[in-house]
Image: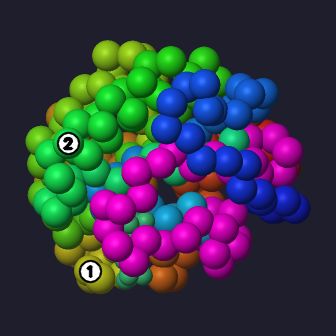
Amino acid sequence: MHIHSAEFIKSAQKPDQYPMAAFPEIAFAGRSNVGKSTLINVLVNRKHLVKTSKTPGRTQLINFFLINNAVSLVDLPGYGYAKVPKKLRYSWGSMVETYLSRRESLKGVVLIMDIRRTPGVAEFDFVAWLNQWGIPGILVLTKTDKLSRNQQIKQQTAIAKQFSRHSEEFILFSGKTRSGQATVWAAIEALVGNTD
Ligand code: GDP
């Protein structure tokens, strides 16, 4: 994947603040601190396009980026950070649910999970949402560099089982070694077409 341009377009909370739906769009979701910003930055080959959040749970905005003038990537606010007040947690739910249910250019959502963690209610609910709206999900297990190859396979198998899916449906990724980057792009391009 050759990245010749990657630009921040705007931040939004509500649909009337979204940019025009002029490009096929892929959104990224995951628990706060899971490595979502890192994954997007690795995909677009830029160190700081997406600011990695020093204060987890603080950024409660939907951020839109345009890549190669061809595909729009959307950073959804991270979920599940315990210190976020209940009121904010609610607004996270309504903000993300509104986006997922109404964005006509949305072609798929990359759901990022830490390969070392057992998925929880938040992940199962999220996949249920995607199914409910017929939005294709790209499932990514990140931070694989923290485990041995054997442990990675073991975790991939266990997590897939919990979702009643095949283990090959979970892409292994590392923001540190960048392994899996091409596989994530291939999954994105299968949904949006060629983006070179
Ligand atoms: P976000 O809150 O989901 O956007 O997470 P960030 O991308 O800001 O990452 C959270 C922390 O995890 C940072 O300290 C990153 O350096 C680290 N991190 C992210 N991805 C990886 C990875 O694949 N491997 C390792 N070892 N650390 C990672």
Q: Report helix, strand or loop for mark 1.
A: loop
Distance from the alpha carbon under mark 1 to that under mark 2:
36 Å
Around disc 1, counting alpha carbons within 10 Å, would you say few (fewer than 14), some (14 to 19), or many (20 or more)? few
Q: Where is the N terminus found, in terms of image quarters? A: bottom right
Q: Earlier in the sequence, mark 1 or mark 2?
A: 2
User: Residue 81's spot in the image, x, y percent?
Assistant: 21, 59
Rendering quarter of residue 112: bottom left
Q: Is mark 2 within 8 Å of ligand 1?
A: no
Residue in the image at 35% along x and 62% along y: 58
Q: Report helix, strand or loop for mark 2.
A: helix
Question: Is residue 163 positioned above or below 106 on the image?
Answer: below
Q: Which residues are magenta?
A: 42-71
Residue in the image at 87% along x and 62% along y: 4
Magenta residue check for 110: no
Rendering quarter of residue 153: bottom left
Q: Main secondary structure of the magenta part?
A: loop
Question: Is residue 147 positioned above or below 180 on the image?
Answer: below
Can residue 8 be seen by looking at this rendering? yes
In the rendered view, does 27 fall on the left or right side of 36? right
Q: Nearer the viewer, residue 47 or 177?
A: 47
Question: Is residue 10 positioned above or below 114 on the image?
Answer: above
Q: Which mark is residue 147?
A: 1
Q: Nearer the viewer, residue 25 or 150?
A: 25
Q: Please tell me how many numbered marks the rendered image carries.
A: 2
Residue in the image at 26% along x and 65% along y: 115
Rendering quarter of residue 91: top left
Q: Which residue is mark 2?
A: 87
Q: State how the image is colored.
A: rainbow
Quarter of image, ligand 1: bottom left
Question: Is residue 45 positioned above or below 69 on the image?
Answer: below
